[in-house]
Each structure stands twice: as C-alpha cells, then as structure tokens.
Image (cartoon, rainbow, N blue to C red):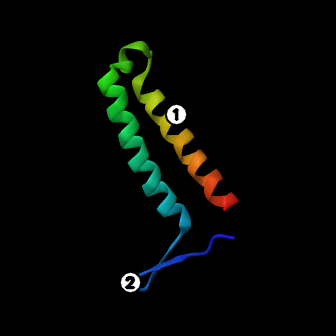
Amino acid sequence: MLKEIDIFGVYVSPFVIQLLIAVAFYGCVRCLCNFLELQKYVWHPALVDVAVFIIILGIIVSISTKV
C-alpha cells in the first residue's frame, strides 16, 4: 500500500509524484514525436497529446501499485 511522502513537513500524495514522473516521460515522448514529425499524421494533435499523457500516467500508476 502506498503511503504519503513527507517533503519538508508537508505530506504529499503518491499520485503527485507519479504525475510528475509522467510529465517527465511525456516531455521525452513529445520531443521524440516532434523530431520524427509525427504530428502531421494525426487529425487532432491536442487530443492525441492528452491521450498519450493519460496512457503514460496509467502505465506508471499500474507499475507502482504492483511494487
């Protein structure tokens, strides 16, 4: 079971840490997609961005709950 993390006397939910990790991974994926110019193959880039971020976040949450 995941518990709160104490950062300088402030209790932070584990989901916040997972969210920050997902943002870092999403930044890397976004840079790779820009380098490969994959945005020209999608109809709605903003929708794809949100979907990719939610997929990455779901994978991170799934992995962290199994540990």
Across and down, in percent, residue 51 comes to: 52, 34
Across and down, in percent, residue 52 comes to: 50, 35
For mark 1, what is the residue? 51
In the rendered image, which quarter contains the N terminus? bottom right
Identify the mark at residue 34; answer none if there is no mark: none
Q: Amino acid at mark 1?
A: Ala
Badge 1 crowding class, 10 Å Cα cut-off, few under 14, some 14 to 19, many 20 or more, is few
Establish if 18 lies above or below 30. Answer: below
Establish if 66 lies above or below 5. Answer: above
Across and down, in percent, residue 21 comes to: 45, 54
Indicate which disc, 1 or 2, sits on the residue closer to the N terminus.
Answer: 2
Question: For numbered disc 1, what is the local secondary structure?
Answer: helix
Q: Amino acid at mark 2?
A: Phe
Query: From the viewer's perspective, is 55 left or right of 17?
Result: right
Query: From the viewer's perspective, is 33 left or right of 5?
Result: left
- Residue at 36% of width from left, 42% of height from top? 27
Question: For numbered disc 2, what is the local secondary structure?
Answer: loop
- Residue at 59% of width from left, 46% of height from top? 59
User: Which image quadrant for residue 25?
Assistant: top left
User: Which image quadrant for residue 20?
Assistant: bottom left
Across and down, in percent, residue 16 comes to: 49, 62
For mark 2, what is the residue? 8
Badge 2 crowding class, 10 Å Cα cut-off, few under 14, some 14 to 19, many 20 or more, is few
